[in-house]
Image (spheres, rainbow, N blue to C red):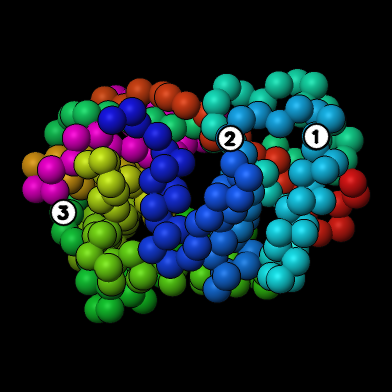
Amino acid sequence: MHANLTETDLHLVRLHGRVEVVDDITVVRVPDNPGYRWGNCLHLPSPPAASELQSLIQLARDTFEDQPESNHVMLRWDGEPIDPDLEARAIELGMQVDAGQMMHAEDVQSVEAEGVTIRPLHIEEDWEDMVALNIACDPEEIGGVADYIAFKEGLRRAWQAWVATGTATWWGAFIDGTLAGQAGMVCCPGRRGRYQSVETHPEFRRRGVCSMLVSTIGNHAISERECTTLLLGVNPKGLALHIYAKLGFTLGQWQNSLVMLPGSHD
């Protein structure tokens, strides 16, 4: 089956939210986390024309009128990078580009890092350490903006929901007994394994934690969960890109989105 990151995104939403198709547009909702932009959005079947943006913004507002705390507008689609004319019109209307890229692999290089041990995490017993690590890896949450903190708390509730279904397992990398890195692995339809929230504590970076974590849980998904394709989303300008490439991941399809935040003009 063709690797598609968005299909795994929608699978994750279905585990704790709602997905429905209306007139070829996929409406994605996570009502208990209204500030989750990628979880409360319209997914378009193809790139919009610049001339369509105004009407699509209004459609999004009308669609989420019954969910007033979702006070952003997010339009998403897969394909090539955003066309410059479309981006220019979006900026004119007060929207921002929020795009990423898929990476995929069928095999992952085995990696060991000195002093690092990997094991599955227990969602209850390890929860405080998991939350502390997630916050430590996110300067924006450390800054304490209330709406963003609420979004992150909702995202972590999603972790719990995914694990509770048996679909996901969270893994930890430990150095001298301290949780130094973590990541989720979600088994999705089509025998696809989807990484979630791969992160290394700032104090333990450049010690091979990420490489060993991604390698270990990927190989486990292939050998024990019978996944044939591993997928992850990446910032193509991010520092982790070369780590994943060394492990055997290759760049694939773009996930494009335009977001309008509260207070933006249109």
Q: Nearer the viewer, residue 75 or 87?
A: 75
Answer yes or no: is residue 161 visible.
yes
Residue in view at x 46 percent, y 41 percent: 6
The first of marks 3 and 1 along the sequence is 1
Residue at which label 2 appears? 45
Q: Earlier in the sequence, mark 2 or mark 1?
A: 2
Task: Report which quarter residue 123 is drawn in.
Answer: bottom left
Report crowding for label 2: few under 14, some 14 to 19, many 20 or more residues within 10 A (C-alpha): few
Range of magenta residues: 224-247
Amino acid bearing label 3: Thr
Please give the residue where the numbered disc 1 appears in the rendered image.
52
Q: Position of residue 238 (x, y in %)?
A: 51, 34
Nearer to us of marks 2 and 3 is 2
Pick the front one: 21 or 119: 21
Give the residue number, with chain letter if any, for mark 3: 117
The one of 206 and 38 positioned closer to us in this rendering: 38
The residue located at (45%, 50%) in the rendering is 10
Where residue 110 sits: x, y (%)?
14, 34
